[in-house]
Amino acid sequence: WVQEEAPDVLCLQETKCGVSAVPPEIRALPGLPHQFWASAEGRPGYSGVGLLAKTEPLNVTYGIGDPEHDADGRVVTAEFPSLFVVCAYVPNAGRGLVRLEPRMRFDAAFLEFLRRLDAQKPVLLCGDLNVAHAEIDLCHPRANRANPGFTPQEREGFTRLLGAGFVDSFRHLYPEARGAFTFWTYLGGARARNVGWRLDYAVLSQRLLGSLCDSKIRSTVAGSDHCPITALLAV
C-alpha cells in the first residue's frame, strides 16, 4: 500500500519498537530513504513513532521539550523548506481514565510546542491524536461520553488546538461526512459493521488551507485496527 500511495512523507504511530528493531522491509521501502524513529526509553513495546521522507529534511527534532512526556517517544518533527511535519502519537487516557490528567498535561504542552513551530513556518500535524472531537466522529457518542477518547476534557483540548489557528483538514473539507472513521476495535466485528472512531488526523496551520488539495481516509486498507489517512498538499 505504501508503494502504491507513494507519499512524500510517511508518518507511523504506535510502532512499539526501537530504531534497532525496525524491520528490514521498512528500512528498504523504495522512495523513503530518510527515516527517523523515536521509541520509549526503557519500555520496549510501548508507544513509538517514525517519520520517513522522500527528501532529506532540513532538520529533525524529537519530543516537545517536556521531560514528563519526551521519554515516551511520541513526537518526531521534520522541517522542510515550506513547512514543519509533525508525527505524533498522543497518550491514551487509559481504562477508567487513570491517565487522563497526564494526557491533559500533554495536550497543553503539545499545543505550546505547535504554537512555537507555527511562529516560524506553517505546520502539518499527522497522527493518532486519541480523541474523537465531535459526536459525528464516532459511532456511539452517547455511550462513550465517559470513555477515553471522548471525554469532555479531551474534546476541549482539541477545540483549543483549533482555536489556536489550526484546522482539522478532513472535517474542513467534509463537514457533514458520517461514518468516516479511522479506528475500529478488533472485538465484535466492529470494522465490518463500521462501528468506529475517527482518531487519526491531518491538522494544519490555517495559512496552509490554500495549499490543501484533499484529506482522505483510506478505510479499505487492512493490517491494523487503524487505517491510514492521506493529506494532499501543493507546497
Image (tube, grey):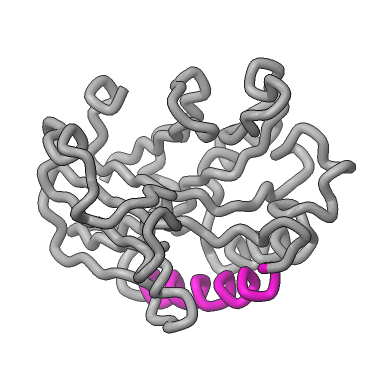
The x, y position of residue 178, in whole percent, is: 71, 27
Which contiguous range is marked in magenta? 99-118
User: Quarter of the image containing the N terminus?
Assistant: top left
Examine the image and state in which quarter residue 164 appears.
Answer: bottom right
The x, y position of residue 53, in whole percent, is: 19, 46
Residue at image point 39% right, 74% down: 71
Residue at image point 74% right, 63% down: 97
Establish if 68 lies above or below 165: below
The x, y position of residue 124, in whole percent, is: 39, 54
Let me know if residue 151 appears in the view: yes
Instruction: Verify whether residue 18 appears in magenta.
Output: no
Which of 20 and 134 lies nearest the eye of the viewer?
20
Residue at image point 59% right, 35% down: 183
**Left or right of 2, for residue 103:** right
Residue at image point 49% right, 71% down: 110
Let me know if residue 178 appears in the view: no
Q: Main secondary structure of the magenta part?
A: helix
Examine the image and state in which quarter residue 196 appears.
Answer: top right
